[in-house]
Image (cartoon, rainbow, N blue to C red):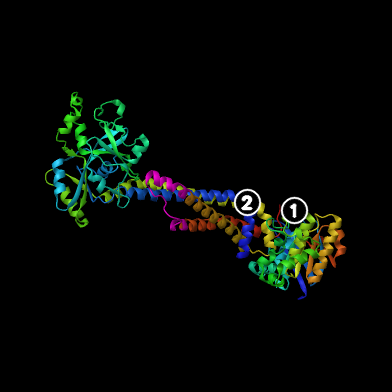
Amino acid sequence: MTALFSLAWASLLNRKGSVILTIVAVALSVALFLGVEKARSGAREGFENTISGTDLIVGAPTGTVNLLLYSVFRMGSATAEVSWPTYRQILERPDVAWAVPIALGDSHRGFRVMGTTVDYFDHYKYGGGQPLALSEGLVFDDLFDAVIGADVARDLGYALDSQLVLTHGLGAADLGSGHENRPFRVSGILKPTGTPVDRTVHVSLEAITAIHVGWETGAKNPLADSIPTEVIRSFDLTPKTVTAIFVGLERKGTILTTRRQINTNRGEPLMAIIPGEALRELWGVTSIAERALLAVSGFVIAVGLVSILTSILTSLNERRREMSILRATGARPGHIFSLLVLESGLIGFMGAVIGIVIVHGLFALVAPALQARYGVAFGGGGPGLLDLYVLGAVTLASLLIGAVPALAAMRRSLADGLSVRM
Amino acid sequence: MADHVIDIEGLRFAWKSGPQVLDIETFRVGAGERVFLRGPSGSGKSTLLGLIAGVLEPQAGRISVMGQDMGALAAAKRDRLRADRMGVIFQMFNLVPYLSVTGNVLLPLRFSPARRKAAGTDPQAEARRLLARLGLQDESLLDRRVSDLSVGQQQRVAAARALIGSPSLVIADEPTSALDADARDRFINLLSEEVERSGASLLFVSHDASLAGLFTRAVDLMAMNKAGAPA
């Protein structure tokens, strides 16, 4: 076998040009597949790490995914709210350790605004228990202070003490109907987390109430702006409703009981979801696309393998002479077969190795930038078990596919005998 | 009969659904003989060589090579016999393009442990010795790409390859047809010398009757072959 191995190697070297192209095709297909797979698992990990440490999310009855979407991902909007007294009830439950209310509905230049309490910054965790951290400034202190996510600061070029004006609803600021008369000041900027927090403007719940003084009918009262801010500060700004409540429990063991009790709450109808469960459900929705992507990149590998087949098959005609020389010097048909299978396997193996190197090189190059910008750790670590599987599978598949030209060459060499009609 | 390296009786062969190509009553080559087989192209000589080398199977008759009945041997056994005990030289394009000169000479040793053993402890040195005997002393030639060699040099490399590991029979199919007269005679003389030294038999096929004198015996295939297939 070693005799054939060196023969196969010499033969490949002799056809360097076309062999290198084929290896590149295989390498790129393997790199694409592994890249997709790594990005996919990275995305999934990032996705599952969006929220942690929160045991339940409570909102008005809606779909599980819907509640998760608007409370955590700031997508879509709530159809109903939860009243303040109900929030108080939940907070005072003996099995509840903490409950942080959030109020959504306004926006700032495309970024969602979320009203909450300072407790949010202590209790909201992501990435397996990491707390939010400020890169600059402090959490809100004054009524019109805002804490902005990393993306907001970067995209809008905001620094500490930048002024910003919220927009009622999700419209664009220049359409008016805004809260121009109640500008906010950036008091703190959060470090990137790779979660929707990066794209959120955080203000206090009271601030949400304050900017909506004069909006009680749902539209802006023409006199709303005439109320001086100083007067508003003296109002009781406790909100009447909140959009959702993040809940932490005293003991994890009671999670199902607590959820059932909240779901069957007498009085205001409520819905409680377990974030991890809801995240998996939501991921299930996207996993079809994800699997389709994986399937497509799998097919690209198949194309890479077919290019091995093509390159060897097309070389067979010009190698007819070589085969009969090998036969004449004592090669058995099995040798001819093994030689071509080995060549195919070598191309596949080298392609896969180079593909793996490309992917890891690329991720190693890009990962620090991704980490800094999005707070996501991508494709962590060196080559893993998956790479080994892919290397093995591609090599095996190329050995198998090599059997096609190998059989053809073997049959032909038997028919040709010693004399090849050129 | 045991002395005969090649012993053919009542041999018949036709390509699939084609006309009879070979019909030979008897043809024998003794041990150590250097036989010249004359035949124009299309006379079936390559087919005959294929049968002797064991890559083709006769439809009728007996063909015995080195005491082995080729018709009764399995294909793998015939391959083994060829690998271990025969050397083959073609008309041209004898060499594997991606191997060096020495790599080509050593090629039979890859497939035959018996030849490897017969080539001694240092096959490289044996290859160099054979090449030198055949007039390729220049060491700088050894690692050259074979496509850089002249046709005459290529044929001598092929002869060294056929001779390495002391085969019992060397088959040469028009090895000199691409050479000029000078090179041709020199090649045949060198080949004959080396064949003689190793004690092998030589079956040399050519259409050129003028070469007959350089061998111990000459046979005309056209006279021997009753099939006399048209070209």
Q: Is residue A290 left or right of residue A346?
A: left
Q: Is residue B231 left or right of residue A253?
A: right
Above or below residue A371? Residue B183 is below
Q: Which residue is mark 1?
A: B148
Check if residue A368 falls in the magenta segment.
yes
- The residue furthest bottom is B2
Above or below residue A178? Residue A408 is below
Q: Badge 1 local density, few (<14 within 10 Å), some, or many (20+)? A: few
Residue B66: name its quadrant.
bottom right
The three-letter amino acid code for the residue at tag 1 is Asp
Q: What predominant SS class does the magenta segment belong to? A: helix
Q: Quick one: A296 or B45, which is closer to the camera?
A: A296
Query: What percent of the width, then of the height, locates residue A152?
Result: 34, 37
Q: Specify whether residue B140 is in view.
A: yes
- The residue furthest left is A267
Query: What percent of the width, then of the height, locates residue A224?
Result: 19, 26
Query: What percent of the width, then of the height, locates residue B113?
Result: 66, 70
Span of residues in magenta: A362-388
Q: Secondary structure at mark 2?
A: helix
Residue A348: name its quadrant.
bottom right
Q: Specify whether residue B16 is in view.
A: no
> Label 2 to label 1, Cα distance in Å?
18 Å
Q: Quick one: A338 or A301, which is closer to the camera?
A: A301
Quarter of the image with the N terminus of chain A in it:
bottom right
The three-letter amino acid code for the residue at tag 2 is Lys
Q: Which residue is mark 2?
A: A16
Identify the subunit bearing mark 2: A
Q: Quick one: B103 or A207, which is closer to the camera?
A: A207
Q: Secondary structure at mark 1?
A: helix
Tag on residue A22?
none
